[in-house]
Amino acid sequence: MSNDRLEKPAKSQDEELLAFLGYKQELKRDFSCEDRSVLVYSLPNGGAVAMWTVCCFFFMAIACSLGELASSAPTSGGLYYWSFHFSSNKYQRFLSWTVGYVNNIGWISGFTGLDFATSLQIFAGVTIGSGGTFVPTNGQIYGLFCALVVFHAMLASLATRFLARLQPFYLAMNILVFVVLIIALPIATPAEFKNSASYAFGNFENLTLWPNGFAFCLSFLAPTWTMGGIDAPVHISEEARNASVAVPRTIIMSTALGCILGWALNVAIAFNMGTDIANILSNPIGQPMATIILNSLGQKGTLAVWCFIIVIMNMASMDILVASSRQTFAFSRDGALPFSKYLYKINKTTGTPVLCVIFCAAISMLLGLLSFAGTAAIGALFSLGIVCQYTAYMIPILARQVGKRQFRPGPYSLGKLSSVVSYTAVAFMAFIIIILLFPLNPDPTAAEMNYSIVVVGGILTLSTVYYFLPVYGGRHWFSGPVRNVDGVPSREEDEKQSFEKGEVEVVVNDNN
């Protein structure tokens, strides 16, 4: 693609770049560069300040690596498209297939986890309002969870222009709640719950049976889940204006904003939570954050803040379902999912993939049934989202570095730092995946087991079996991302021609 294309208006550039990647414009581009709030969708779960400080460094490495790929090829398929394009010919179809399935279930499980958490937060508010006399049953929690899934599916099916208008409001409310808590907690917290700087920054209380060092690593679940979905902007690439610039900018800025606000709130909590961690965790409210805020602001103040938190979480759930449905749409466009010919449809009224939204919502309700299997099973759901996402991130990032395929940088590029940043991000994600598959205690009972490995292993096994299935398996018909636009040279053809003519410098990975 020659340089004069970059000088065209943003809309023409977006459509032309998408055609260059092999797809025609089917979704409406109503999201702008300001839609950067998709990641800051949950307040941190608490924990050591040092935990957040360590994790934030690696979150930014992940964001920068994904941003570089998104700038080069901004398409809703994102991760599995990159896996195919940058992997060697021998493995590109299988890796693309695997990443697509893992990313799909990762997003759906992330949506499930957040909606389940939202139902818990709503009932926590009811418990606070009742003075601790109301305790919800599993059936009530699941029923509210299903109602939230239906509600968010309705919102996620709306026309993109309506969803885009909600984003500035959501971002402003998110920041406002963080700022209010950061200011209000130090002012309102009674003296008995005030902590010293040495406690806030240096204390680490291990309530597990693991050694302190390993227990500290296990606590990474809080920031990693809170800062999950770093690739969310990628999946609305085909609905964003000036996508090759807006998407990487959104990924990096939203991650940075989440890190800053999350760290600041953790500092405020550490100074104003008291020292009785066990009591906070065992409080009938069932939500440590709610307990800490209640101790500081009292019942009325907590309920006021809690209402805004619930609104923020509902908005976040909608955004996650939007991203999840767009990933499903992209994967079905390439024929990889069962029922792809039905899922690959755009609703004529809303201009959105409504059937994909319904598909994701239905699977989410099924995953929510894990809540009846106990806290360990539902805990596996939260770990599942991170394990699947990080697996899907690692493969294209590594493929870009070691795949020996041509890489055309977009407007955002890490340059010579690309390899260092990418390998740092991959090492951290591999470490987190291993950590999150461990149980909370070294000698767990059946009820305390971490079943994430079972769920993740089941997903990988089923997708692999489906791929290698005789006659009907994906290896017999899945050819990777399928071009649905004519008259435009493929990315590989254009890169080869441009390189031969000396029109563009193409970076070739030669790490091997």
Image (cartoon, helix red, strand yellow):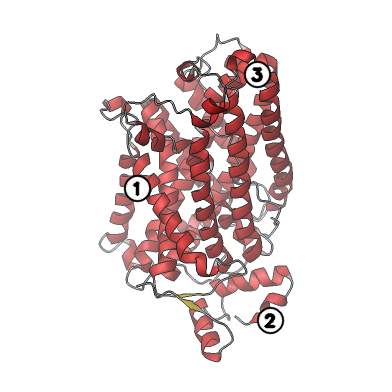
Above or below, comparing residue 93 to residue 133 in the picture: below
Residue 20, image quadrant:
bottom right
Residue 442 locus on image (x, y percent): 28, 30
> Which residue is at a point 37% across and 50% down the rendered structure image?
430
Q: Secondary structure at mark 2?
A: helix
Task: Tell me how far mark 3 sits from mark 1, CA to CA.
Answer: 46 Å
Q: Which residue is mark 2?
A: 4
Image vertical order of residue 275 relative to residue 157, above or below: above
Q: Quadrant of residue 235?
A: bottom right
The amino acid sitting under disc 3 is: Thr
For this rendering, which residue is in front, 420 or 233? 420
- Vertical position of residue 101 compared to residue 297: above or below: below
Q: Are marks 2 and 3 in contact (CB under 8 Å)?
A: no
Q: Which residue is mark 1?
A: 459
Q: Look at discs 1 and 2 and give the one toward the viewer.
A: 2
N-term-proximal mark, 2 vs 3:
2
In the image, what residue occupies the spot 70% across and 50% down?
A: 164
Q: Please, what secondary structure does the residue beneath circle 1 have? A: helix
Q: Which is nearer the eye, 200 or 347?
A: 200
Three-letter amino acid code of the residue under disc 2: Asp
